[in-house]
Each structure stands twice: as C-alpha cells, then as structure tokens.
C-alpha cells in the first residue's frame, strides 16, 4: 500500500465515502448525547483518517512511516500502524505508549 496519493481515483473516492459515512453516523450519535459528554473517540479517529487522506499520509504507519498493508486497511480503515509497530505498541502497553506521543518517524507529532 502506498500513501493515499498512490490510490486510484475510484479507490480514493470509495474510501473517502466510507469514512464520511462513518463520520456522519458518529456525529449523529454524538448529537443525541448531552453536551456534557466529550466527542466520541471513534469520531476523532475518523476525522483524523480523513485528514491523513487529504494530506497524503493515509496508509502510512505513524511510527515507522512504512506502508500499512492493504489487508490491514481493508479490515480497519482507521489503522495508524503497520502490523509490526502495532504489536510493539501493544507489547509495551497502551498506558506507557500514551506517554510517548512523539513519533520516531514524524518528530513533533
């Protein structure tokens, strides 16, 4: 899988449609909650995936900048890590990883 810039126009349009539909559904669900509830994490993830698609980094691992395999993206269009980095992330524990926000592949992110 290349970056989103390498997607065919029809694949890009299909992916964008899927993500937009998810975002609309999550926004509808969020509106049904009181204002005291924070925005749903999944909605933030969908918006982030749309932004990555827009800037050309969709399908690129957040940690190592390698392409995320297509089967991974097919199973989870919101994926931000390739299989190897996801396993490492899960091995150190989400609590510890949350403290290490800086991406080695993208310092400052």
Image (tube, helix red, strand yellow):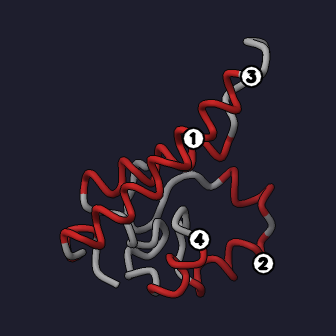
Q: Quadrant of residue 85?
A: bottom right
CA–CA distance between discs 2 and 4? Answer: 20 Å
Q: Nearer the viewer, mark 4 or mark 3?
A: 3
Number of the label disc, if any, that sits on residue 44:
1
Q: Position of residue 20 (x, y in %)?
A: 44, 47
Q: Which residue is mark 2?
A: 91
Looking at the picture, tell me which residue is in the foreground, 73 or 91: 73
CA–CA distance between discs 4 and 1? Answer: 15 Å
- Judged from the image, the secondary structure of the residue bearing numbered disc 1 is helix
- Judged from the image, the secondary structure of the residue bearing numbered disc 4 is loop
Q: Position of residue 73 (x, y in %)?
A: 50, 76
Q: Is residue 60 above or below residue 97?
A: below
Instruction: Report the number of numbered marks.
Output: 4
Q: Is residue 58 above or below residue 40?
A: below
CA–CA distance between discs 3 and 2? Answer: 36 Å
Q: Which residue is mark 3?
A: 32
**Reading the chain from its start, which is encountered first: label 4 or label 3?**
3
Q: Is residue 31 above or below residue 54?
A: above
Q: Position of residue 56 (x, y in %)?
A: 25, 61
Q: Nearer the viewer, mark 2 or mark 1?
A: 1
Q: Which residue is mark 4?
A: 76
């Amino acid at each position: 899988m290349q970056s989103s810039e390498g997607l065919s126009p029809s694949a890009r349009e299909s992916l964008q449609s899927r993500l937009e539909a998810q975002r609309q559904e999550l926004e509808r669900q969020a509106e049904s909650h009181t204002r005291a509830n924070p925005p749903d994490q999944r909605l933030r993830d969908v918006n982030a995936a749309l932004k990555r698609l827009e800037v050309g980094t969709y399908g690129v691992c957040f940690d190592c900048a390698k392409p995320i395999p297509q089967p991974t993206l097919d199973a989870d269009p919101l994926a931000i890590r390739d299989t190897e980095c996801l396993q490492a992330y899960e091995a150190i524990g989400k609590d510890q990883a949350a403290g290490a926000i800086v991406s080695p592949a993208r310092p400052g992110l």
